[in-house]
Image (cartoon, grey):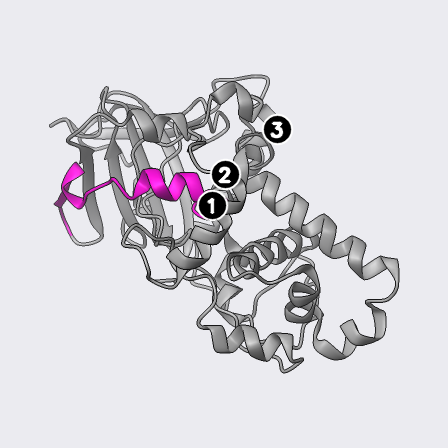
Amino acid sequence: MQNVALNSNCDVSSYDYLWRLSPDRWAWEFLRRNYDFRLDAAGRSDNDISERPACPGFRFLRSRVPQTIADRWGLVFMPDPDRDGVEADAVWNLHAFPDQIEISCSPRARDQQCEIWNHTVPFCEVTHITDPVGREFLLVRRDRYVVQVRCTGISLLGLEPVLMKLTISEVDGYERQVKLQKAAFELFGEKRDHSVPQWTKTTQVLRDGLIALDCQELGMNRRDIAVVLFGAERVNAEWAGPSQKHTIRYLVKKAEALRDGGYLTELLGGGVAPDKWSLPQHSDRGQEQRTREGSALAFGDIDRRPTPAVSSLQTLRQVRKGRVGRVRHLKPN
């Protein structure tokens, strides 16, 4: 993997966990910054989901209530938007994420070995999810890498032993599914040293887009965002020209588009335009009012609030004065 050096002198190390995320986890990072989604998620309760632990490293989740609103956002149930792309139990339904890894489950003889089980369960944390109609999914985590799996065939919850095999059921998405399967093999083998982020051009653009959204939540303008990403010295030297302004404009527009529905097509490959999904819109308040309330919510003036994107107003003052501060995204776990 190509390692792209970061240009910023600002400490944005709290975003380092992002570099290993799969596309569906990136989609969650953008969606959880969506104002309307956070309002919908504010109505969730921990009691909505039944959680049952099993053996060490294995847990079972099942919804106790209908998940109509979550389904409209492309999710099996409503996760906690304060949890990041690694920790959140964000499970995408098949319509939103058609290329998700599929495992076919069939009866296994008593003396038969299941290689997928043997190479994952002893080394990974596994979350089994059952949706409201009985479909089964897995979230498999290891070393802060997450893979979502859709299970077909017999139930994993039955009494008989199960043999799991990777399968591709859709010819149209063959290449995309193979790519995701190859990436999933990160879960196998010996534990590697991932302490130094290895950004590609694509993941750096996505990361910078998230930083831009978090800065906007505090009311920063585009020049402020440039200072966070590139450093005050470089911005002072180059901001008068068109290049840096164009870069920031592109990052902001790209990130806003992904946050506001583009995650469905560009990151999940759903192939459905966002407006066709009839995503929930809280249109009773104007955009200007929403922006003002969003800033107030971020600093705890109202109970149903988005999590603060940046640590404090002091950070904003430091950035605007040209002193590089420490920027924190929606709080990690």
Give the SS element for disc 2: loop
Viewer-proximal residue, 253 or 65? 253
Mark 3 is on which residue type? Glu
In the image, which disc is placed on residue 175? Answer: 3
Q: Which of marks 3 and 1 is in front?
A: 1
**Residue 93 percent coordinates (x, y):** 39, 27
Closer to the N terminus: mark 3 or mark 2?
3
Q: Are marks 2 and 1 in contact (CB under 8 Å)?
A: yes
Q: Which of marks 3 and 2 is in front?
A: 2
Q: Are marks 3 and 1 in contact (CB under 8 Å)?
A: no
Mark 1 closeness class: few <14, some 14–19, many ≥20 residues within 10 Å: some
Residue drawn at x 31%, y 37% is 138
Is 41 colored magenta in this rendering? yes
Separation of marks 2 and 1 at Cα, in angstroms: 6 Å
Q: Do the residues labelled 3 and 2 touch (CB within 8 Å)?
A: no
Residue 116 visible? The answer is no
Residue marked by disc 2: 286
Residue marked by disc 1: 290
Residue 189 visible? The answer is yes
Viewer-proximal residue, 239 or 20? 239
Q: Quadrant of residue 258?
A: top right
Is 196 colored magenta in this rendering? no
